[in-house]
Image (spheres, rainbow, N blue to C red):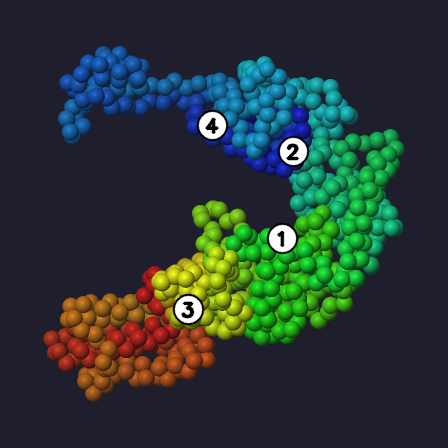
Amino acid sequence: MPDLLIELFSEEIPARMQARASDDLKRLMTDGLVAAGLTYDSAGAFATPRRLALSVEGLTARSQTVREERKGPRVGAPEAAIEGFLRGAGVTRDQLTVKDTGKGEAWFAVVEKPGREAAEIIAEVLEATIRNFPWPKSMRWGAGTLRWVRPLHSILCLLSDESGATVVPLSLDGLTAGDTTEGHRFHAPDRFSVTSFDDYRAKLKRAYVLLDPTERAEHIWHDASQQAFAQGLELVEDKGLLTEVAGLVEWPVVLMGAIDESFLGLPPEVLQTSMKEHQKFFSVRNPKTGRIEKFITVANRETRDHGATILAGNQKVLSARLSDAKFFYDNDLRVVRTEGLEGMAKGLADVTFHNKLGSQAERVQRIEALAREIAPLVGAAPDLAAEAARICKADLQSEMVGEFPELQGLMGRYYATEAGHDDGVPEACEMHYKPLGPSDEVPSSPVSVAVALADKIDTLTGFWAIEEKPTGSKDPFALRRAALGVIRLVLENQVRASIQPLLTRLVVIHYLNSRLGEVETAQVSLRDVQSGEITKELAAKKTIEILGTSVPEAVADELSARATDLLAFFHDRLKVYLRDRGIPHDVIDACLAMPNNDDLTLLVKRAEALAAFLKTDDGENLLQGFKRANNIVSQAEEKDGVEYSYGADIKFAEDASEKALFSALDAAEEKIAPAMQAEDFSAAMEAMAALRAPLDAFFEAVQVNTDNEVQRRNRLNLLNRIRRLCLSVADLTRVEG
């Protein structure tokens, strides 16, 4: 069985596209080969800045002959239909047979597709792959019609086995497949021939090309770490940058340079960001001081002076870049020292957050009021939370964040410290954006938590108020991320609060804010609205003052519906979050159906306890017993047209198991009620588990729907008591079982 080697050699492929491109090459080629009848043992794809390569091992030499039976027109069909079938199947009339289809007789033909040589199939699949390659961006060059990410120079396509290697015949837009390639652009530019993948890989290495991007990345990391360690320093880890740099070079040469002393006073994050974004340099840190003192650059060639000239040029460019950063930083510090962060933040009044939600300055005012309100719930001082909220967005007006937007928040911490803020306020300036994703750090300092929650809740309620919700895969304002951030902040800090009234009130505030300019005579005070609970009636009253509408109830109902929809959005995000932690969707639904489902911490506590309970034998069996009891009572209520909820009486109990179940229910109720009051769901479910044995014994010994009407009603009321008790802990009707 032969092996296949393909190389598509071009001008430099952008580093960000290489991994996806190698995967696409492998997928398109292997899928195409299999669809055409070839099989293979394994395949691997590789990328360097100038080539995509694919190795397929154990490829079948020829596709098999395929015979298939095709059904044609019915017997007696028009001659034109039969002739068309003959042409399509490639057979003659004497090759047709007649078969009964169950709906009458029809013509059938056996079509035989002979097998084809692998080389013929490979040429077809490779041409289709090249012509339809899914580059994010592509170009044409010269007079041809072919499109590629950069001009394509050559195609290598070889089939090799024990007898040798042969070139797969392929000509494409002036390019003819061959068995040659090039090495490193400077060290080994001459073309050379190869006979197999192993030969190809070995000769490339001798020609100063490391084919495997993983090998290049490991080489860079090893050499860089060793050079830093030799000088008592440590390399700052950056996996994204490592992957990118490995895609910029074919023969990585690691060089370490020094940062000028005049720049070492810059925050280490500024140095790291500037070097990464502008120069693709790695940062080297002094572990004793925490300062970034040196940098690592990766060249694509070896030089006689061991990189001295390259380093000198890089240091010159780096000094110019860092001079800009130092200029921005010094200017920002001057503003902070003279005007404070609130002075820096004045320009936010001229920055529009959203045309319906006002400026950034107006948003900061809302966050301040909300942070002050949230502070007691998270153990923060309200004044400190408000102070942090007032300045948390100030660094958006700084020159440093203007140059490096990714430093927002972080620079706020530095500037807040410089301005004399303390007691957790500087940390809140940095942390209030977090968490930015499912694995990002969650703030734990009370002031940071208060401001982070206020920031995200203000965003969510604002966009819900103006009906700018995520749709499908579109989420331009990252509202799903904001909701997950609220969930993680609440759960990981064990925040206890019912959020539905807060969401409703904030939706009303945003709604009124968005319409203040529509009616010149509006006299409503938003400060009054923010100061207390917004009832449905008050919302209607304020809305009629703003809009002059005669149907305030309809508007109030709509606002309430939007807030309810936002809570449902939180619940949907929470389901995803809990499913990732192993809690089934039906368990979550059973807890969502219970009261106080807007207290997310309480909701998760209930769900975790129920999930753990249902994993036990007692829990699983009790669930089946509950479902049986619920079904019997529900069917009887539907049949009889009455509700069996008037209380069962032990004096009508005849069987010992029936009396034992009464006693078990009495004991369980005594434990479950206080446990639920104390929100001890584990204890409540443990007490509920004690019902399993007496309930099983009851069903074994007693017939519920007996002919004795008194006994039947009493037993149905007893089962309803079980149903009611179980449903007081969780809605078990929603649990699959």
Contact (Cβ within 8 Å) of mark 4 with mark 2: no
Q: Which residue is mark 1?
A: 351
Separation of marks 3 and 1 at Cα, in angstroms? 32 Å
Please provide percent x and percent y for residue 642. Answer: 18, 73
Q: Earlier in the sequence, mark 3 or mark 1?
A: 1
Dividing the picture into quadrants, the one containing residue 252 is top right
**Closest to the observer, 697 or 681:** 681
Q: Tell me the residue at 26%/69% (across/down).
A: 630
Regarding mark 4 in the picture, which secondary structure is present there?
Answer: helix
**Which residue is located at x 67 percent, y 29 percent?**
12
| Whether residue 564 can be seen here | no
State the residue lying farthest toward the left.
707
Q: Residue 444 placed where, x, y %?
A: 62, 67
Q: Which residue is mark 4?
A: 32
Q: Quadrant of residue 595?
A: bottom left
Q: Residues within 10 Å of mark 3 (few under 14, many from 20)?
A: some
Instruction: Read off the residue under disc 3.
Output: 541
Q: In the rendered image, which residue does mark 2 sit on?
A: 14
- Which of the two discs, 2 and 3, labels the residue nearer the N terminus? 2
